[in-house]
Structure formats: structure tokens, C-alpha cells
Amino acid sequence: MAQLFSKGTNSVARVTLLGLVIFFFGFWAIVYAIYFSPYTTAQNVPRTQPVPFSHQHHVAGLGIDCRYCHTTVETSAFAGLPPTTTCMTCHSQLWTDAPMLAPVRESLATGKPLVWQRVNQVPDFVFFNHSIHVQKGIGCSTCHGRVDEMPLTWKAHSLYMRWCLDCHEAPEKHLRPKDEILNMQWTEPKGQAQRGRALFAEYGLNPHRLEQLKDCGICHR
Amino acid sequence: MTNCGPYKKQGGAPIPRAVDLAAVRSQLAAETGQRYWRSLQELAGTQEFWEAAQREFPPGASEWADALSRRRFLSLAAASLALWSLTGCTKQRPKNIVPYVKQPEDLVLGEPMFYATTMPLGGFGQGILAKSYEGHPVKLEGNPEHPCTVGGSDVWLQASLMDLYDPDRSQSVAHNGEISTWDAFISDLAEMVSEEKTRKGAGLRFLTETITSPTLSGQLEAVLKQLPEAKWHVYEPVNQDNTLEGARLVFGKPMAAQHDFEKAAVILSLESDFLYSHPARLKYARAFTNARRVSSGRRESNRLYVAESSPTITGSVAEHRLPIRSSDIEALAWHLARECGLQVKSGAAVAPQSARQWLSQGVADLQQHRGGSIVIAGEWQPPIVHALAHALNEHLGNVGQTVFYTAPADSRALNQLASLQELVRDLSSGAVDALVILGSNPVYTSPGDVAFAQALSKAKRTIHLSTHLDETSAQATWHIPQAHFLEAWGDHRSFDGTVSLQQPLIEPLYAGKTAHEILDVFLHQQPLRSDYEIVRSFWSSQLKGGDFENQWRKAVHDGFFQETAFSKVDVRVNVGGLQSAASSPAASGDLELNFRPDPNIWDGRFANNGWLQECPKPISKLTWDNALLVSPVLAQREHLQTGDLVELAAGGRLLRGPVFICPGQAENCITCTLGYGRIRTGRVGNGVGINANAARSSRAPWFESGVKLRKLPERHEFAETQLHHVLGSPERQIYRAGILSQFLAKPDFVKSSVSEPHPAQTLFDPKEFRYDGYKWGMSIDLTTCIGCNACVLACDVENNIPVVGKTEVGRGRAMHWLRVDTYYEGSPDNPSFNHMPVPCMHCEHAPCELVCPVEATVHDHEGLNLQVYNRCVGTRFCSNNCPYKVRRFNFFQYAKYHEPSFSPMYNPDVTVRWRGVMEKCTYCIQRISRARITAEKDNRRIRDGEVRTACQQACPTEAITFGDLNDPNSAIAKLKRSPLDYSMLGELNTRPRTTYLAKVSNPKT
């Protein structure tokens, strides 16, 4: 009886086996890549907005304080989104006829709010509080990135839970002195780990609180 | 709301509902010592019962109970499993974010704001603090500064929020059933007003509910001044007629008795439910329980005697309770008066033999505490009983000490039933051209012998203002949607006379209007004023002297006008009035049918409120139904089981309904609550329960004697929760109680009765959690808990707990995180009632945490037992392992977060849960979190009392205390050191953070 399989079949079998292994890891690599890609996280993807508002121009160019618009960042869970009237404090005087600003003027005239695209969002079962982060040494740029360099705003980080936990597990890596909170250019200085630990105590935190920062109930309730 | 229809039992082996009462009695007779029981089924103690009680969920809850076959289910499950893997691929959908155009001053996005306002119920105002996020109210609390609310809540105050967002509310003006406009209505009304002016209003009638509002009554009186022939009628099915008539008998004028329960050592109630349905219930409940709060170091306690026909909250906390027919209470009152030495002719009846012992104890106690006792009569008792109570209080020297008299808060203290009958007569004779009904539903609420519906059709023009398109609206020429109290300006008096301001929190959602605005058409033709202008201008004319603007602003801020309570009036009882009013008693064997306001939906106005429908009623634990409550003796005699349908014939009217065997019900007495059997209220309330109004008569609105009972072959399934979550056999001493003398002699009598294992005897790592920061704990005082359910409703509202519907409740899937268990003790004919609120125990050694395969239920460093919804995969192992049965599972998508009208109602601080996840009490972690963040920002610790759980805040008697156990000076730490403190099932070494303070009662020995 003749051989059922030709010699070449061995190679096919070897390639298949290898292929299966590659497929297995490759599949997960692709899943992983998709999961962390901007396609899923929307990280680094500028959002189209009804008015092409440029943080770069307003923050870096004009030097307007973050809190001029995000008024409640130090007092509330929500940082605050400026009402139309805030835009119009300047734009009733400047660029009053700019076609780009037509939706803002229309909003004021009709009383209908501007509808922005949300850039940074966490799921409904996550309860993030801006005020406590800002007051305990986490600066704006730590999470939001260099907003002063964003012509249109994008999300600087994935906002995945792993990313949150990186800091909740070791906040000293990111703690800043109180007067540097709003500083967009701030970067971790040399010896940040040590400075961070000193700041940690300064902000009234202790090892027990550090443990607690990892409790699920801190964010989920 | 899901599946509100009739409950069909499907699948599962249910707890046996039929009970052999004779066996129960012989069983009880054989028992010695104290024994608590939860249900007659438990007393019967059949094997089936205990088998069912062993289970994680009540039988039927966790079974596959659908028409779908198992095979089909499995194939669908396989398909969904395959699709499930794809769910990991979803990405967050982009969302919009919308700022204000002009942001209101003072508004901080994400931070709640509180406004003082007022809720009217039965005409009387309850002061409220309403919590609002970005303009939508999400929670109502009692106003702690309000003299008549004192910060407490009742079920209605809590649940009325759902009425605001009810999608079934009437949404437009209707003219003969067709959608119309407010302007069309105004022009028609103006035409009518000018017509009526020519004849001084002879054809015009107003019908309102009880009104205490100074502005509204001022407006009505002004209208009557302009149109002197017009008449103003008042009718409300649960009214103060008897109380006011009783005062008229002995004082010659309507008066309101105000009681100081804190000073009374002995209280004797003749069917008064002053802790639950009295207009001053919140103030009374606080004062009454303060006088028995032994946990605060008090060494004495008041004593309560209650004679009543059907168990109520007040009766359930009484030391000496006498189940007696309502019709026998008058004789009892006469007897009491004579025994106390009041000079009354003894022509009146003699109290039944069974009541003598109760009475002699009561009399001795009252005599002993002259000047320190209270006799109080219930709204359902005839005027003479109220008159006798007044005479007794005066005779016992209580007037001026514990009882005071003031003017009544009602703007029009007339006999409402007589007023309604007069209106019906006028309507029937054709004398009425136009009837303006402001906010009541007389077609549904009128007694069966007052043919209001027929009479109404004789009026040429009827105008009906109501929140829903109800039974009356269906017959009205004009229907006007009424604004909810959170949408409109107004004012109401509380029972003590305090004028409380009703301030809106939101623009009317459905263009609702107020009675003020309609009446303004009669006074100022054009331009019409808003409710705000009307109320404000009324008060600017009333508040003379001083700066009006400041006074008004202060009143708006406080929620009431300071010092507007009525001043005490000195009145003397005219004993002559007593003799004339005696009535003849019912024959002793007669069956009696009683009518009472429903403990949940009151007179039917809350029928479309899912929270209230689903809240287990105090004592009976019925949901989604009313029933004919019968006594065990009557059930045995007539061979009735719970759920059997009967037909009652009373005074020529018939009432068909299912019976419910109620321990503690008076023997020959059947009780039915009002408010059910609505046909036009909304999707939730329509067709639920039986309509008792049809069987009511104007002659005897509260109890009817000479009732004939006929058993029908049909049966009805109730969804009662009393059989759910049975915790185990009586030996486990779940409920613990003692009497005052025992407590004084041996304060730790509770602790010594059970041995608890040493904390070190555990497999848990003792070093894992040290609780260095905060250590949260709760204490529930069983002495002061009155079982009123305010905590249950507060928890529902605070934590976005969904309504699941009758079918689901019947399967044991009710979602309440906090339940109130009732433990009976003694004979089913007259047991003592013991209420036990059961939230999550937050065990330090939590059995639930160990078994979760995905770590969705974990411990935290403050001792909370967390439930992480986004991790939960719904294995339900945790629930299976919970000895307290406090975990609730979302078997379906119960929360209606896609219903647009409900989404603004949800508390934004709490996740709305989805299908397939477990949930349970979180100790209001969102409130802890808020306080922690506030404190951290100030670099300080959370102060004692800064975190109050929703149940604690709502409790009218302050029976629940919450706080940090690490602070030795906190209120909670002090209570935990009390000798009365005990852990439920402490022998399991779960080390629960929620513990109880044993009940201490003070019976006369």
C-alpha cells in the first residue's frame, strides 16, 4: 500500500503546529493591541467640537488660569465646564464677528447650550473626585497631559483602572507641592521618590491611608 | 415597573401557606418560656417550612420559572456565551457634555443643594429638606429645625419623590377628554366667573381636600365674599371629623388637642395610631420614644396601653394591647371614665368581660400618674370617645401638663362627610352649574352610599385639578394637571399651627398648575399672577411690622414662619355634652368591618407609587395588595386560610376580597385598608387590590357592624414578605428583649444569655485589617424602633433600589436592602409585636467575602463589606453564604435607567445596577466618601455625626445610630458599650458591625 502522506506533509504538519502557537500568541497580542490602541481608548485622538476651542491658545498663549473656566475643580467632584457666559466675558469684546464663534453667540442669544464632545470620561460605576486630587498634590497635567499644547483637546491617558492604580499604589511618584498643581510644564524632578514621600506626610497622608487608596470602595460604590 | 399584574405562581416548592391553626395552638400550649415567631407557618413548624427556610433565597426565587424549556434555555445560553466573548471588544461610546448657558449663582456642579420646603398630606404640612443636584431633587429628608417634623421622616415623605417623576402623571389640560390648553381653560373660566357674578355665585360650588393653607383659604374666602351665594365644601376620605366633633361636644367649638408625650409616664390610646397616622406623628414618635430610651442611661420608661381592632404601629409597641372591636371601644371608654371617677351617668354600655383586666391595670396606672398621663382617642372612633378622652384628661389633671388645647389647623373645621352629602344633594337637585374640585378625587373616595359619581354628571361644568387623570377627571368637563408640591409655591399649617412654606425645587415637569392660580381667575381676571406672586403677596399683607423682605427670606430659608404655632387656649370640659352622645353598642357576636387608611398608599393618592406599593406593610408584610385582615379565631371558625376569597355583606353593600390571617386582630373584626382598587391612576396602581370605599357608608365611615361573611371558592395569591429571609430556629435568640425591672436589676441580662466564641477562634487572619483609621459601626435600638418603614423607603430612594413588581416579590426577589422583620411572641390571638430592622451586618469575619470567585465582595480598611458591581458575575455564592440573608440579586434588569422621566430621580452618587449583579446595604458608602473627602481637604478627621446613613437620617425615633467606633466619645461607641448591646447570630463569630440594643419594655406587673 502506498504511503498515505507524502514526505512534504511533515513540513505542513510542522508549519501547522508552529502556526497554531503563533496564532495563539498572535491572537492575544492583537487583542491586547486593540485594547490599548487609541481605537479603543480614544487616547491621543483629538475630538471634533462645535467650536474648535484651543487650550493651547488660551492657556499657553494667553495665560488664562485653568480655574477661570473649570471653576469648581478645587471644591467639587466635577471640575466644571464653563457656561456660554464665561466665553462671552471676553468674546463680547474680542473677535465679536468671528465666524468660528458663531455657535457661542447663538447659544447666548437663543439660550440653548453648546453641546461639546466629552473628552475625558470614566464609566458610570466609577466616582472620580477632582477636588481631593487637586488638594492632595496631584496636578492637572498628571492626568490630562500637556493641555497647553493641545490645539484641539484629546485624552492624554487611557483612564483604565490599571492606570489609576499605578498612582493609587504609589502616589509619591506623582505628588507635587501645592503651588505646582496648575503648572503645565512641571515634570518629576530628580529624587521625586524621596520628595514625594515628604509631600505625602505634608498632605496629611499616612501608611494607613495609602493602604486604603487601593480599596475598591474608594472609587466604586 | 415590571410585571405588576396578578401574581401567578410558577415553579419552585413554595413555603406552605395553609396553616392548621388548631395544631398551632396546641404547639404553643406545649411551649414553655419566651418564644419569638415570625409567622403562623413557623409556629406550625412543619418540616416543609424548615426545609424552605434553610435556603439561600425564598423558594421560587432562584429557580428557573419561565415557560421556556430547559433545552431551549441551554441552547440560548450557549449562543449568548459565544457572543459574550465579544462584549470585551466594546469601547466607550462618545458622550456629549452640556454646560449651562448662564450658570445659576451658588450652584456648584456635582455638589448637592438643600432647600427647605413642605409636603402636605391630609392637609397638614410636614417640613422637608430637599436635596437637589443641578436642579433636580433626588432625596427628601425631614427638616430638623421644623417644630412639627423634628428631622424625622415617614414613608410618604420619603416616597413622594417618585410621584414627582411619575411618567403616568397627567400631562396636559383636557376639555371633555380632549387635549386642550391652559389659555382655553382660562377664557372659559373667565366667562363662567362673569356669568356667576350676575347671580352672586348661586350655582358655584368648590370642593377641596382638608385645607390648612392660609393663602388658599384666604383666596377662597375672598372668592366667597365676592360671590356670597357660592359654597365651599371639603371632603377627604381620611379626615378629622370625629376629632373635631368630639371637641365640639365638650368645648362647644372645634379644638385640637396637642400632646406632650415626653412628659407622660402612662399613655392610654383608644385606637389612636398616634405614632403612624396622626398628623403630628413625627413629633409624637420622637417624644414618645425619648421617654423610653433606656439606652441613653434613662432609668425609667413610659408605659403604653392600646385598645385597637387591628394591629397598628402604635399598638405594636404597646406594653398592654387589647384587641377589641372598634365598636366596643366606646363602651370601654365609658367604663374607663367611670372607673377613673368621672361623674357620668352609667346608662352607657358595659365593657366586654375580656377587656376588664386590661382596663383595671390601665385605670390603676392612670390614677397613679395624675398630671403625667395621656388618654388619646383615634380618628376612627366616634366623637363621644374623643369627648370622653378630653374629659378624662381634664379629670386626671393632664390638661396643662401633658395635654394642651389650641385652635385646629384646618381652615374650615366642618364635618366633611356632611359637607360632601350637602354637595351631593345640591348636585342632584340641579342647583349646581359649576363645580370646581381642587385636588381631591371624590368619585373614587366617596363612601358607597353617597352617589357622588351620578350626582356629578348633573353639574353643567366641572373643573378638576389633579395630578393624575383619575376617576373624577374622567367625568370632568375640564381637567387641569396639578403641580406636585416640589413644583409649586404654597403654604400649609402643621398640626401645631406652624405655617410652613412650600418652595418649588423644579419647574413643573408637565405644565402643572396650582389651586392658587385657578382661584386667582375669580379674583383678578387679567393679568393672572403666578403662584409665587400669590403666596408672597398674601404674606406681605399678613406680616405687619418689621421688614417684610427679611421675614420672607428667612421663612423661605427656614421652610416655615417662626413662632406661628397656635397659642394654647384655656378650655373647660362641659360634662353635659357627654351624656347626649352615647350610642348603642353592637351585639357581642356581630362581625364588624373596619376601614383604615392604608399604611402605604394612604387613601389611594400614592397608588401609582411603586416604592410604596412594594414596601412591605408594617406587621402584615403585604406588598402590592390590600386584604381583609381576619383574626386567627375567626379564620378557624369559618375555615379560612390566607388567600381565600370571601364576600362580605355590610349594610346592603358587598365587598369581595381575599382574607389574610393577621395575628393580633380582634376576634370578630375584619379590617380593610382604603386606597386600592383604583381604575384610573396609572400603570402601577390600576387594578391592584380591592376598593373598600364602595363598601363604606356615610353613617359609619370607619366601622360597620352586622357584617355577613360568605366564603367563596376562589383563591388569591398574596406577595407577602413575612415568609422571606427566615433566619433560623427560636433557640438562636435573634430577637432579644427584657423588661425594665429586669434591666435595672441586671443591666447585662442580654449578654449573659448566650455565649459567643472568643474573637481569636477564627480562620481569618487577625492582622489583615487593623482598622487604624475609621471603624464604622451601626447600632439599632429595638426599644425605640417602632417599625414604621421610614428607613426602608429612605434606603430605597438614597440607593436607587429598583421596584420589581408583584410577581417578582412573590418569588422572593424584592430588592430592599433594609428589611424590617416582625417577631411575634405569645398567642396568635394577642401576641406582642417586635420590630427588627435588618441591614447588612458588615461582618468583620464576613462569610460572603470568602466564597466570591471574582473578589467582587471584599473587605475594606474601614471595616465595610464592599460590593463591587463591575466585578460581580452573579454566581450568588455570597448570598448563599450569608447567614443574615441581606443580599439581593438582580435577576432581571429591574432598574429603569432608560425611562427618561426616572433618570433624573436617581441619586447620582450611587451606581444604578444592572441585571446579573448582587447588591446589598453599603452603609451609604457615598455619604462616608463625601464626608471623608470634605474632612481630608480640611486636614481633619470626620466628626461624630457628620456621616448619617439614609436610614438613620430618616428614622423618626432616632433608633439607628452610625459612626466611628475608633472614637471613644462618639455616640456609636457609647451605645456599643451599653449592656444592652448584642450581635445577631454572634455565636457564628462573624463579628457584625451592626449590632442591636435589646428591647426593654415596661409592663405593669
Image (cartoon, coloured by chain):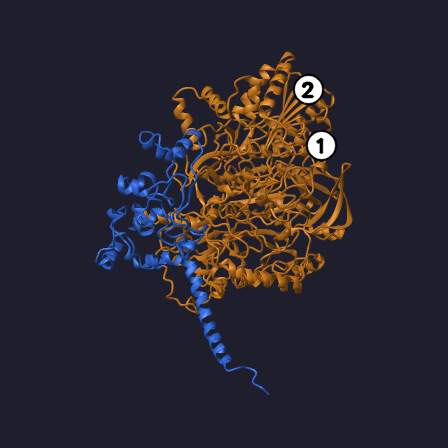
Chain colours: A blue, B orange
Say whether residue A142 is visible: yes
The answer to which image quadrant residue B193 occupies is top right
Say whether residue B367 is visible: no
Judged left or right of residue B504, residue A146 is left
Q: Can you name the residue that lies furthest to the top here?
A: B198
Residue at image point 47% right, 59% down: B871
Using the image as rendered, state which of residue B1 and residue A44 is in the foreground. Answer: A44
> Measured from the top left, where is residue B377 in percent x and y?
60, 37
Judged left or right of residue B181, residue A19 is left
How far apart in space, not on screen, are marks 2 and 1 (Cα)?
A: 28 Å
Specify the label residue B655 is tagged with: none
Using the image as rendered, state which of residue A111 and residue B309 is in the foreground. Answer: A111
Using the image as rendered, state which of residue A81 and residue B642 is in the foreground. Answer: A81
Query: Looking at numbered disc 1 in the image, what kind of residue is underneath it?
Result: Arg
Residue holding disc 1: B699
- Disc 1 chain ID: B
What secondary structure is marked by label 1? loop
> Measured from the top left, where is residue B437 in percent x and y?
63, 26
Residue at image point 49% right, 65% down: B853
What secondary structure is marked by label 2? loop
Specify the label residue B433 is tagged with: 2
